[in-house]
Every structure is written in C-alpha cells, then in structure tokens.
C-alpha cells in the first residue's frame, strides 16, 4: 500500500475515533435526529422539513438496528469523505503529500467535528458542496465532459438532501460569467446536465407542488422563529471560527486564486466565495449554512503555501502549519463539544459565555448551549410516557399528542415504537393514524406552552390527572408535563381532523 494511501487511511481512522469520543455518555440524541429517524417509517418523495435523501439514510440505519452507533456513523462517514475529496482535490492541483496532509488536518480539526456528531442533513450538505467544487475544478483542468455530468449528479443529490446547495449554484453562475471560464456556457453538455438535474429532482418538485410547497411554509416559520434573532454581523463573525486553526491556509487560498499563476483558470472560485457569503449575509442566514464553502479553499491554500515554502528556506514552516489546527483543537476540545456534564458547564458558564455558546435562538443566555440542552431529557420523557401509556384502560385507543417533533420522535425512538406519539409540528402533521377510534388522550406540553391545559381539557373527559413531568434541570424540555385524560365525552378523531384542516388552510 502506498505511503499516501496509508496516511489518508490513518487520518480517516482518527476522524471516526474522534466522532465517537466527543460526546459524553450522559447526552442522548438531538431533537432533530429523532425527526429524521422517524422519516424512515413514512417514506415519501418529500417532507415538510427536509428533502427525501435523509429518510433513505434513516431507512438504512433502521435496517442496521437503529442503534445510536449507526445514527452517529453516517455523519462521521460524510465528514470522512469530505476529507477524501479535499485530499483528491489537492492531488488534482498537483499538490505534494505535505499539502495533502496539511489540507486534511485543516478539515479534520475544525468545526466539522461538531457538525459531524449530529445526524442531520448538514454533514452530507458539506460533502455535496465540496464534491461539486471538485468536479467543476476537474472539468476546468481537463475539459473532460464526464465531470460536468458528475457535477450534475452531485448537485441533484445535494439538493435532494438540503436545498441549501442551491445558493452555492446561484453564486457560482455570475462567478463563472465574470471570468474566462464563462466558455462553459457555450458547451451543449452543460444543458444536457441541466436536464439530468431536472429529471432527478422532478419527483420532489412534484411532491412540493402537490403539497402546496411546504418548503416555503417551513422557511417562513424558520424566519419568524429562529432567523429573526440572527443579524448580519453574527453571520459574518461566525465564519471566523469554523476553521480557526486554518485561517492562514484559507486566506492563502483566496489570495492564490487572484495572484498565483498556476491557479489563474480557477479564479472564478474567488468570486464564488464572495458572492456566496454576500448572498447569505443579505438573507441573514445562520452562520453554519456557509460551512460547506471552506474545505475546497483549504485545498487551494494548502497547495499554494507548501509550494511557496518548499521553494524558500522556510520549509520547516510546513510542519508548523500542519500542527496549528491540531494545537488549537486541544483547548477547544474542552469547550466546543458536549463532552462535559451539564453541571460542569454551568459551574464554568463564564468560559462558555465568552465564546457566545450560551446564547439560544431566543436571543438569551442559558446555563448550557442550546444544542446540548436539546440532547437531554428525552429518555426520561419516553420512559415516563410509556409507563403512563401502559396503565391506560385501553392503550391502543389512546392518542399521544406532543407539542413538538422532538418530543414525538424521542418517544417513538426510545420506546421502539411500542408507543406511537404525534404532533402538529413539522412532518408529524402528515402521520396521524385516524383509522383508530381514540377514547383516551395523553397530552405532552412544554413548560412554556403549558398554560391552562388541565382546566381547559378536563371537562371533555371523565377522568383527568397530571401524571408526571421532566425533571432534568438542564434539558430544554425541563418542566414538560404529561397530562392524562381518560374516557372522552367528545369525538377526539373529529377534533384532530378539524385541527389538521386548519393547519392545511394556513
């Protein structure tokens, strides 16, 4: 086996090992992961929250036993493949083995370690961006048309995973037009490739059309509940921390695209970088939406810096550059990942606050980071709901209605679907089983939405009581209450249907 292959294999092994040791045992799955895993049980051409690729991966996880090990495997795999693509890009740019190791180290010891711990579309999104860049670069270098078709397939997969990649292509088009690479638009293959994209994404577009484009509704909700607390400065400042140990390499890559003669034909990538960030800044996007932009520029920076240093007396600076992301990772290891108990974080909250990690989507600071709080309390909720469910007069005629998709998904996941919960949020609105005639009702209410649930609902049932609540003080669901209502005096099914019609009209 070649030395180059052995090095890459070693880096990939380190990548997988890190992904599994960066999360402390007390943390559970993230609320978003539960929703994505539940999609495996409701396969469709599209979903209200994400395109269909995630459901297919979730089905594979289900076939593999649905264990947390496999849930974490796929984002780690996509992260490892991103490193492989960067490695191959550096090789395509005639970079040396030192450049390959530098680029791989920069990508490995970065914010992608955190991103790749979560089973969300983001890990595949970053891989799709990087692979799309790779095939465009390959075409520009060789002019072999097969790379245009590969790029079309990668873009289609990326779009069927997360619509975010569309913004990259929107920025790429004017970037290509501004440079000599615009000649690509005179090639008939680019239009054949566009037809391939249309064919591949057509089923999802059709699903969106039939369902009144829920992606638009989803974006409106996102804008009004989460992005409303995002400002443009936060987006731009957030970009500085994704690859903090690789800042010099990234800057070198951008400079090289303008000044380094061997990279002259790739100059369009500089403008693509500027246009993509400008677009996201204008839209007040979350900072991590642009994280897929950086790996490919690390590849250019690695080649440029190593080439320049090898031609000078400063060759010893190469191992220093390789060590930088590793050395910066060491102090970040203690605060940037959920590898410390929540109680420890609370005791040292000033450290986390200084990094802005305690600020949640509501714009306020809390005891622990929001992502960490979203990984606590779920097993407690599932266990308590299952206990209550099994004590019901007739469990099979009991409807479990949750406030949010995290609650519903966690109950379904941790009880192995022995208990089926639902919600009026996200994709769950399409998954109600109204063929069952419900007589009993378990209502899961978040602390902030609890209101007068008991007083308002009790009159419609013969027996009502509060069964339990979530007691973990660090969980985002802390205080979530389990209300129980037995022997309905009204038709529960009709009320659910009425609510679904209201949501459909909205």
Image (tube, rainbow, N blue to C red):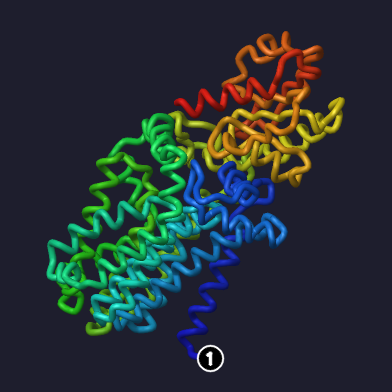
Q: In this view, does 462 lie to the left or right of 210?
A: right
* Residue drawn at (72%, 29%) of the image: 399
Quadrant location of the C terminus in the rendered image: top left
- Can the viewer see residue 340? no
Disc 1 on helix, strand or loop?
loop
Q: Where is residue 44 in the image (x, y as percent from the top left)?
A: 55, 50
Q: In which quarter of the image is residue 195?
A: bottom left
Q: In this view, does 306 lie to the left or right of 450?
A: left
* Residue drawn at (21%, 59%) of the image: 173
Q: Which of 251 and 418 is in front in this view?
A: 418
* Residue drawn at (29%, 40%) of the image: 283
Q: Where is residue 428 in the image (x, y as percent from the top left)?
A: 59, 37
Q: In this view, does 500 lie above or below 30?
A: above
* Residue drawn at (35%, 36%) of the image: 230
Q: In this view, does 274 lie to the left or right of 129?
A: left
Q: In this view, does 281 lie to the left or right of 76?
A: left
Q: Is residue 457 above or below residue 243?
A: above
Q: Position of residue 270 (x, y in %)?
A: 21, 62
Q: Which of 346 and 66 is in front in this view?
A: 66
Rate crowding at label 1 as few (under 14), some (14 to 19) or many (20 or more) other CA atoms within 10 Å: few
Q: Quadrant of residue 227?
A: top left
- Can the viewer see residue 297? yes
Q: Is residue 144 above or below residue 473?
A: below
Q: Nearer the viewer, residue 278 or 112?
A: 278
The residue that disc 1 covers is 1
């Amino acid at each position: 086996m070649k030395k180059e292959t052995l090095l890459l294999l070693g880096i990939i092994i380190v990548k997988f090992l890190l992904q599994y040791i960066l999360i402390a045992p007390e943390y559970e799955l993230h609320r978003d992961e539960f929703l994505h895993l539940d999609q495996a049980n409701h396969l469709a051409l599209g979903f209200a929250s994400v395109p269909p690729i995630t459901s297919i991966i979730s089905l594979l996880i289900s076939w593999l036993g649905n264990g947390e090990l496999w849930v974490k495997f796929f984002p780690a795999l996509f992260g490892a493949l991103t490193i492989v693509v960067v490695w191959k890009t550096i090789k395509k740019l005639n970079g040396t083995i030192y450049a390959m190791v530098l680029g791989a180290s920069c990508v490995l010891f970065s914010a992608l370690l955190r991103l790749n711990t979560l089973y969300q579309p983001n890990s595949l999104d970053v891989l799709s961006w990087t692979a799309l860049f790779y095939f465009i670069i390959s075409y520009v270098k060789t002019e072999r048309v097969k790379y245009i078709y590969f790029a079309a397939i990668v873009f289609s997969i990326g779009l069927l995973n997360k619509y975010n990649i569309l913004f990259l292509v929107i920025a790429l088009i004017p970037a290509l037009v501004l440079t000599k690479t615009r000649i690509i638009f005179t090639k008939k293959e680019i239009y054949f490739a566009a037809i391939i994209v249309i064919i591949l994404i057509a089923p999802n577009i059709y699903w969106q059309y039939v369902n009144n484009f829920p992606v638009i509704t989803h974006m409106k909700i996102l804008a009004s509940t989460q992005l409303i607390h995002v400002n443009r400065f936060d987006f731009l400042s957030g970009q500085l921390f994704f690859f903090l140990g690789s800042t010099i390499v990234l800057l070198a890559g951008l400079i090289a695209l303008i000044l380094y003669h061997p990279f002259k034909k790739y100059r369009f990538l500089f403008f693509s970088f500027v246009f993509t960030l400008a677009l996201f800044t204008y839209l007040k996007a979350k900072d991590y939406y642009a994280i897929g932009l950086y790996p490919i520029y690390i590849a250019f920076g690695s080649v440029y810096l190593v080439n320049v240093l090898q031609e000078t007396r400063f060759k010893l600076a190469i191992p220093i550059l390789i060590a930088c992301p590793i050395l910066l990772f060491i102090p970040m290891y203690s605060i940037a990942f959920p590898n410390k108990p929540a109680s420890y974080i609370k005791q040292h909250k000033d450290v986390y606050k200084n990094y802005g990690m305690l600020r949640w989507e509501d714009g306020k600071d809390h005891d622990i980071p929001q992502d960490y709080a979203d990984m606590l309390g779920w097993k407690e909720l599932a266990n308590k709901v299952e206990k209550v469910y099994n004590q019901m007069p007739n469990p099979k005629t009991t409807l479990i209605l949750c406030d949010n998709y995290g609650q519903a998904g966690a109950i379904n996941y941790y009880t192995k679907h022995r208990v089926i919960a639902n919600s009026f949020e996200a994709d769950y609105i399409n998954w109600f089983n109204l063929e069952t005639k419900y007589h009993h009702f378990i209502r899961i209410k978040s602390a902030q939405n609890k209101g007068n649930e008991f007083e308002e609902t009790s009159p419609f049932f013969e027996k009502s009581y509060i069964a339990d609540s979530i007691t973990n003080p660090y969980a985002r669901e802390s205080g979530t209450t389990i209300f129980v209502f037995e022997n309905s005096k009204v038709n529960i099914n009709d009320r659910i249907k009425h609510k679904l019609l209201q949501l459909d009209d909205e």
